[in-house]
Amino acid sequence: MWLKKRIRHHFYRLKKRPGSPVITAILREEDGCAVSSKTVSRLMKEMGLKSITVGKYKATTNSNHNMPVHDNILNQQFKVEAPNKVWVTDITYVATGEGWLYLASVMDLYSRKIVGWATGARMTRELVIEALELAYKRQKPAPGLIHHSDRGSQYASSDYQERLADYFMTGSMSRKGNCYDNACIESFHSTLKKELVYQTKFKTRKQATDELYNYIEFYYNRTRRHSTLGYKTPHRFEQMYHEQRAA
């Protein structure tokens, strides 16, 4: 059956990551197949194709410090009207044969695109500054961008706050102990662990960093379709915004 073959092809091409809604969107857009999500779900069950499952999220940053913090300006307003208006950022960890590797990520809330990231053997302010610098260099946002993070000491540090001031960004921080205030970037890290980290045994930090590069830059930003974006990729969703502005 042609449809089953195409479903199986897309499922394994994307390393068993997508569920039936994403497979349905791919079939419609790439194969021109007018099929319902219900049909795709049924066929996937028949073929035993099940999206890999998610692990639990664990907080990494330490908010027990005496440094100044920002008010929660974002206030869970996750729907944004344009790129580079609101960025959210956080740190997560990856196990390797050499010990922990820490990943700092910066996400543009409009497109859910990871605009900056950095890895390191230690969870330091230099790590988060490196991720922010990459995001700023790539996106070149106008003054006034809202930058949201948790209250971790890395983000509250004077060095990091000075960098926000240099970039004319407005700081916003989650309420203490409220993970929902930074739900989008935490969801990305949870997805990354589900789709990559829990499926792979990294011997070295370099191997993990290389795999993270491929996942973030080529898969997550340019290939993975998001339900919140109408099943477009972050790269394509951002691209569509600029095309509409130019029309």
Image: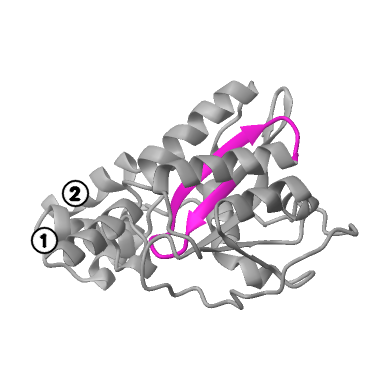
| Mark 1: amino acid | Cys
Q: How many marks?
A: 2
Residue at 77% across, 65% down = 69
Q: CA distance from mark 2 to mark 1?
A: 10 Å
Q: Of helix, strand and loop, which one carries label 2? A: helix
Please say if 135 is above or below 204.
below
In this figure, which residue is indicated by the disc labeled 2?
A: 6
Image quadrant assignment for residue 54: bottom right
Which of 69/50 is in front?
A: 69
Residue at 44% across, 75% down = 79
Q: Nearer the viewer, mark 2 or mark 1?
A: 1
Where residue 229 appears, as percent x and y from the top left, is 34, 66
Q: Is 178 left or right of 15, judged from the image as shown?
A: right
Task: Please identify the dominant SS of the magenta region.
Answer: strand
| Mark 2: amino acid | Arg
Q: Are marks 2 and 1 in contact (CB under 8 Å)?
A: yes
Residue at 56% across, 60% down = 169
Where residue 190 appears, as percent x and y from the top left, is 58, 54
In this figure, which residue is indicated by the disc labeled 1?
A: 33
Where residue 44 appears, as percent x and y from the top left, is 32, 58
> Which callout, 2 or 1, points at the residue further toward the start of the chain?
2
Q: What range is drawn magenta here?
A: 105-124
Image quadrant assignment for residue 72: bottom right
Image quadrant assignment for residue 67: bottom right
Q: Magenta stretch: residue 142 in it?
A: no
